[in-house]
Image (tube, rainbow, N blue to C red):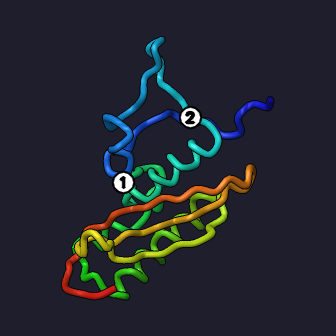
Amino acid sequence: MSAPRYTSIAFIHPDFDAAAGVPGLRITAAGRLATVTDAASIRQALLLLLSTRPGERVNRPTYGCHLFRLAFAPADDTTAGLAIHYVARAVEQWERRITVLSLDALRSPEDPEVLEVRLKYRVRTTQLEDEIAIALPVESGGAV
């Protein structure tokens, strides 16, 4: 068995993975930071990318995604198109380890004040497929 290609520190993102447990870094029984590898590492990198506002990282001021700009925007086709554009640009610039299979933004059927942005992707090295869904609060006045 070969060594993992990608490794990163394990964490649970408070906005995207809250159902997986208490948000924050994971600690092993030995008291060390837990790590994840390969596809899980890439998934975490995508979650960080999409939840980081450009300008938050001092040494990489353009790193991140402009999704935050759409919070409480009207739930219309323009907002959905902008969400798709922002995610596509961020992934294209910062996450070259994946191929985007589909990217869509639709109003949530359960909650009309939430725009669901779904990114389906394939890890280039392993060909494994995964999907990330992001819930973005919007105004319920428009129609998507």
Q: Nearer the viewer, residue 144 or 125?
A: 144
- Which amino acid does the dot numbered 2 rest on? Val
38 sits to left or right of 80? right
Q: Kindly indicate the quadrant of the structure image that contains residue 66.
A: bottom left
Q: Residue at x 39, y 80 (%)?
A: 80
On screen, residue 127 above or below 113: above
Q: CA distance from mark 1 to mark 2?
A: 24 Å
Tell me which label, 1 or 2, sits earlier in the chain.
2
Q: Secondary structure at mark 1?
A: loop
Considering every residue shown, the one lying at the far top of the view is 30
Q: On the image, numbered disc 1 is attached to which residue? A: 56
Q: Kindly indicate the quadrant of the structure image that contains residue 133.
A: bottom left
Q: Residue at x 47, y 50 (%)?
A: 59
Q: Nearer the viewer, mark 1 or mark 2?
A: 2
Mark seen at residue 36 = 2
122 sits to left or right of 113? right
Considering every residue shown, the one lying at the far front of the view is 110
Considering every residue shown, the one lying at the far right of the view is 1
CB within 8 Å, label 1 to label 2: no
Q: Residue at x 45, y 14 (%)?
A: 29
Find residue 2 and report its horizontal and vertical position in percent.
Answer: 79, 31
On screen, residue 57 above or below 40: below
Find residue 116 and report its horizontal and vertical position in percent.
Answer: 37, 69
